[in-house]
Image (spheres, rainbow, N blue to C red):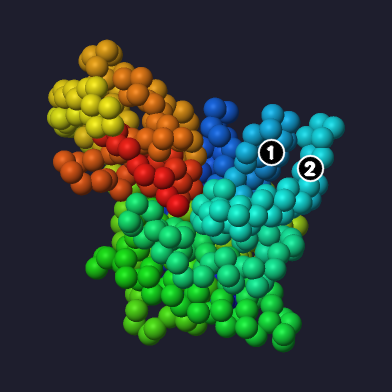
Amino acid sequence: MRSPLEFIFLLLIKGCLPCAVNEDQQPLETYLLNKMAQSAMASEALPNPNVLLALRLAQDHSLNIERRLLKKLSKDAIDRMKNVKTFSSGHQAACSNPRRVSDENVLLDLVSLLEQKFDMEMKNINNSNNPLTNYYQLGLSVLALCQLQGTFSPSQIADLFSPDEKKYYLSGQFSVDTAALAILAQICVQNTMNDAALVKENRTISANVQWLLKKMLEHKSNRGIIGNMYSTGEAMQALFVADKYLVPGSWNCTQTLATVLSEIPKRTFDNPMAAAQLLPSLWGRTYLDVNRFNCSKDKGDHFTYFAFQQIMPFASQRSITVMYTVTDSYSNRFSESTTVTVPESSVFFRVMEAAQEKDPKKFRFTYEQSQWGPYITSVQDLRADNDNCIYWKLLSGNTPLSKGEDKSEPGKEQMRRKMRRAVGSAREQRKEN
């Protein structure tokens, strides 16, 4: 039974935001929490800041898991600095001081490092009209700097996210993910602009947000999905924080929520990154809320572990037959096909494994782990190539799929802009200017 204070808290959330899961739907949210918790505890898993942030924004918490994941993330950040490796501009979850990240005898100020990285991005844009990474990463950077009280110029941010198809389109397709992060970042900046002299900047940001909202909603399906299933969670967050700019009736939050919830039993969001990007919106929360929670009042473990069978139907034991073709359409060295049998609920990566087991010479491949799961690096020794912009694409017939090897999305803006690798057909991609 909920306490009166809990009821008041829930009413405040639901009074300010359009929709959130009800008690009957909570097991679905708990299932995603379990998926993320399992990934956070797995020794072989890459430490994922998005998972930590989603755990912090959830209705229920496990401080033990959050602390262990935070420790892994701190160690990873320090290891990357020691080995001169790049690290994401991702979020810094609450309940830690990002200006004092330590491991053994090393102390890092991640806010200063993020400020330096952002300055490098802006210099590159000024010199070449292109960022070093992409506008999704820039959205993450600005959002983090804004929430962590880092240094930035509101005027610079207003210009950075101005309407420009080049910024928000990837291979001719509008990137809902990028638009959502740009909206979240700009609303955060707008919320900090108390100076009356910033009227122009405020007006520019408002115009930017309105343009981005219009473009995002143009990519809403009749089921309420915005962009695709995996971009919908962050899109919902953007719509929550920018609700004052929405045209009445332009978005039915309840419909969108019902659709994404219906996909959870189908294991659509089993990937921890996919779960992490969806979960905050299930409670009507956003990345802008992360600093609003009082970590000192959180004690112990407050979410329940459910067995898979308690909230999901038993997985089908049936098998399916899949025709798998791998084609090199870059140098035209090979085009091979085979038929394999896999369990009905298999991800595409299992099809690749089955084909390789059947004929290692024709269907051998290599991969590396990423936050979105297996990331294909070569097939028959033909490697994705950043310099020549060669990438692997996953197709069903001639139609690009929205899910990748392990139910991930090949075209996510989180991946390097010029290294989009999926599975299916190798093609040369012109460099984007």
How far from the left and from the top, in percent, is residue 204? 56, 79
Residue 316, quarter of the rendered image: top left
In depth, the one of 62 and 320 nearer the eye is 320
Image position of 150 (left or right of 337): right
Binning the other alpha carbons within 10 Å of mark 1 as few (below 14), some (14 to 19) or many (20 upward) gives: many
Q: Residue at x 37, y 35 (%)?
A: 390
Q: Is residue 132 above or below residue 256?
A: above
Could you say which disc has been placed on residue 77 in the image?
A: 1
How far from the left and from the top, in percent, is residue 280? 51, 59
Could you say which disc has been placed on residue 346 in the image?
A: none
The amino acid type, in three-letter code, at marker 1 is: Ala
In depth, the one of 413 and 15 nearer the eye is 413
Farthest residue to the right: give it: 105
Question: Does the residue at mark 2 contact the one at mark 1 (Cβ under 8 Å)?
Answer: yes
The amino acid type, in three-letter code, at marker 2 is: Leu
Q: Residue at x 36, y 19 (%)?
A: 381
Q: In this view, does 52 lie above or below 293?
A: above
Image position of 213 (left or right of 135): left
User: What residue sits right under mark 2 in the picture?
Assistant: 108
Q: Residue at x 71, y 35 (%)?
A: 81
